[in-house]
């Protein structure tokens, strides 16, 4: 019995650890690209994909739903990129519009599914605010695979990505495939966000990308240190938030993780301000 | 100066929307010169350089760099962009910015060698920024930042150097370092192209000039280009006079 309880607690803990690590790593680059709002748009835009995948397959397995969210997230990024490239509309307006349209569509589909006599539909509600405690062994396996893909790809494109984010014009002039590198980065961003949705939820997933990166930026002086610091803080905040969520009745995991991550980040920023005012 | 053109441009036309920014430009720039691209605001100076380095896609025209068509020839060019194109709050050290100049040589997945470190240090030494190697790029003054970008271009070890408005907003020390380094590179046989606003200063540092106003007004040795009739064609009025007057 004791072993079973330990096993049941270990799976969500490892799952949230992987999500926090990935969010910290990829969130660092999203922060440096000044694209943190894009993360919010992707997270919200995944909802119609998740609902669509459920409707299409009548299957509530996380693999199917995450794949649906991944496709919808990619569509949202493609739309944002096309509109930014071919129109003179500001980025904030584009991101806000895409987020609202996709999330609205997702809520319509979710409402429709809730009226259907299918027992498996209950799983969809967990994508709104997250439920790390109900992560299964299969989910952990999926998160591990996604985590490996994200880390290996990120390490492969690390130097080119840093150059592109710092000085895109220079990257063009030395013949770097800027478009390919940015596309790979956006795919990783969508992958990380969608993989974290089940545990953190569409509403708050972007906070887990941003908060660790903001804290790490205040504490470090290089991209490498920033990424590792953000990954460490993302993982710690995830674990602490999950423990808080497990210990309090009816507290969804997503808000608990985000409050811990953001609270810690605000403390770091406040300490930095206090140190500067003393100096 | 040598007689073989380092860069040739034939019938180059660039549009922004439906508006021509460069209209049928044909020039040949000899090797081993400092060539200033001059003209009034909106004349297409930066666009001309952007077309050479591949940042702007021309509507038509043929560009040859070092005897090769532009896509291949660009591997011989080091480029120093305008200040505005860079994220100055990026957490990166001066040393790492200059090291970016070495990636084309050893590939993005290759290891940084001792030779790379030596070249980076030499480049920083040349522009007087070695003591600031570990400083963050955002902690430097504007002039120091410009020197770091010159060092990055030097670290590329390319025979052709292109600089987009390098003298804009420079302090006296940085301007002096820029001039010294560019003269030294010319002596070594490098070809240098730079976009500049200050007409009065052009003759003091450039051997060659290209005067633009959407169309080519004149190109050739500096003294033959910055004549009053050509400048009136470009600017609509006489502009030569005291240094600094010509920022029109």
Image (cartoon, rainbow, N blue to C red):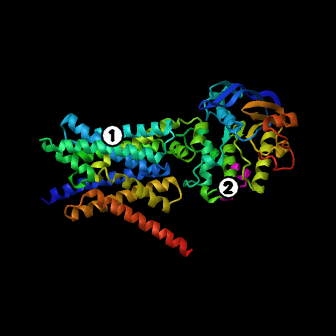
Chain label for disc 1: A
Number of residue marks: 2
Q: Are marks 1 and 2 in contact (CB under 8 Å)?
A: no
Report the residue that reaches farthest toward the bottom.
A278
Residue A107 picture location, percent across and down: 26, 45
Q: Is residue A76 magenta?
A: no
Horizontal side of residue B93 vs A145, given as left or right: right
Residue A248 picture location, percent across and down: 22, 65
- Residue at position x 84%, y 45% from top? B200
Helix, strand or loop for the magenta stretch, by majority: helix
Secondary structure type for disc 1: helix
Secondary structure type for disc 2: helix
- Camera sees residue A146: no
Horizontal side of residue A240 vs B121, given as left or right: left
Residue under label 2: B142
Magenta region, residue range: B121-132
Q: Quadrant of residue A267?
A: bottom left
Horizontal side of residue A34 vs B210, given as left or right: left
């Amino acid at each position: 019995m004791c072993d079973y309880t330990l096993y049941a607690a270990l799976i969500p803990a490892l799952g949230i650890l992987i999500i926090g690590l990935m969010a910290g790593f990829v969130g660092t680059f999203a922060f440096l690209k000044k694209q943190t709002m894009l993360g919010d748009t992707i997270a919200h835009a995944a909802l119609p994909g998740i609902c669509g995948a459920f409707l299409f397959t009548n299957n509530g397995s996380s693999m199917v739903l995450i794949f649906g969210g991944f496709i919808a997230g990619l569509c949202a990024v493609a739309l944002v990129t096309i509109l930014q490239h071919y129109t003179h509309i500001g980025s904030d307006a584009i991101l806000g519009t895409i987020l609202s349209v996709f999330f609205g569509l997702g809520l319509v589909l979710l409402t429709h599914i809730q009226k259907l006599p299918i027992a498996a539909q209950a799983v969809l509600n967990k994508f709104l605010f997250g439920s790390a405690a109900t992560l299964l062994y299969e989910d952990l396996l999926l998160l591990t695979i996604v985590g490996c893909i994200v880390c290996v790809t990120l390490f492969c494109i690390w130097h080119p990505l840093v150059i592109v984010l710092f000085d895109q014009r220079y990257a063009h002039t030395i013949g770097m495939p800027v478009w390919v590198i940015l596309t790979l980065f956006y795919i990783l961003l969508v992958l990380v966000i969608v993989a974290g949705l089940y545990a953190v939820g569409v509403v708050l997933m972007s906070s887990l990308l941003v908060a660790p990166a903001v804290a790490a930026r205040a504490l470090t002086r290089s991209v490498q240190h920033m990424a590792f610091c953000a990954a460490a803080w993302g993982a710690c905040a995830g674990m602490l938030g999950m423990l808080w969520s497990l210990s309090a009745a009816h507290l969804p995991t997503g808000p608990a993780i985000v409050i811990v991550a953001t609270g810690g980040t605000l403390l770091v920023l406040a300490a930095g301000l206090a140190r500067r005012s003393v100096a | 100066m040598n007689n073989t053109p380092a860069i040739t441009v034939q019938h180059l036309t660039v549009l922004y929307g439906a508006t021509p920014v460069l209209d049928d430009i044909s020039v040949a720039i000899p090797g081993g010169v400092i060539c200033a691209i001059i003209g009034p605001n909106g004349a297409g100076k930066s666009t001309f350089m952007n077309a050479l380095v591949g940042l702007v896609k021309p509507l038509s025209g043929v560009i040859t760099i070092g005897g090769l068509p532009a896509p291949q020839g660009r591997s011989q060019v080091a480029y120093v962009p305008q200040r505005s194109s860079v994220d100055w709050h990026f957490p990166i050290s001066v040393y790492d910015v200059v090291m970016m100049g070495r990636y084309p040589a050893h590939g993005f997945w290759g290891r940084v060698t001792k030779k790379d470190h030596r070249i980076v240090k030499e480049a920083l030494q040349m522009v007087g920024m070695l003591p600031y190697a570990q400083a963050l790029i955002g902690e430097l003054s504007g002039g120091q930042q410009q020197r770091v970008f010159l060092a990055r271009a030097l670290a590329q070890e390319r025979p052709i150097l292109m600089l987009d408005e390098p003298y804009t907003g420079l302090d006296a020390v940085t301007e002096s370092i820029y001039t010294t380094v560019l003269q030294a590179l010319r002596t070594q046989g490098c070809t240098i192209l730079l976009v500049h606003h200050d007409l009065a200063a052009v003759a003091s540092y450039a051997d060659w000039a290209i005067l633009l106003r959407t169309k080519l007004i004149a190109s050739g040795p500096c003294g033959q280009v910055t004549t009053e009739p050509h400048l009136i064609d470009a600017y609509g009025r006489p502009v030569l006079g005291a240094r600094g007057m010509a920022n029109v």
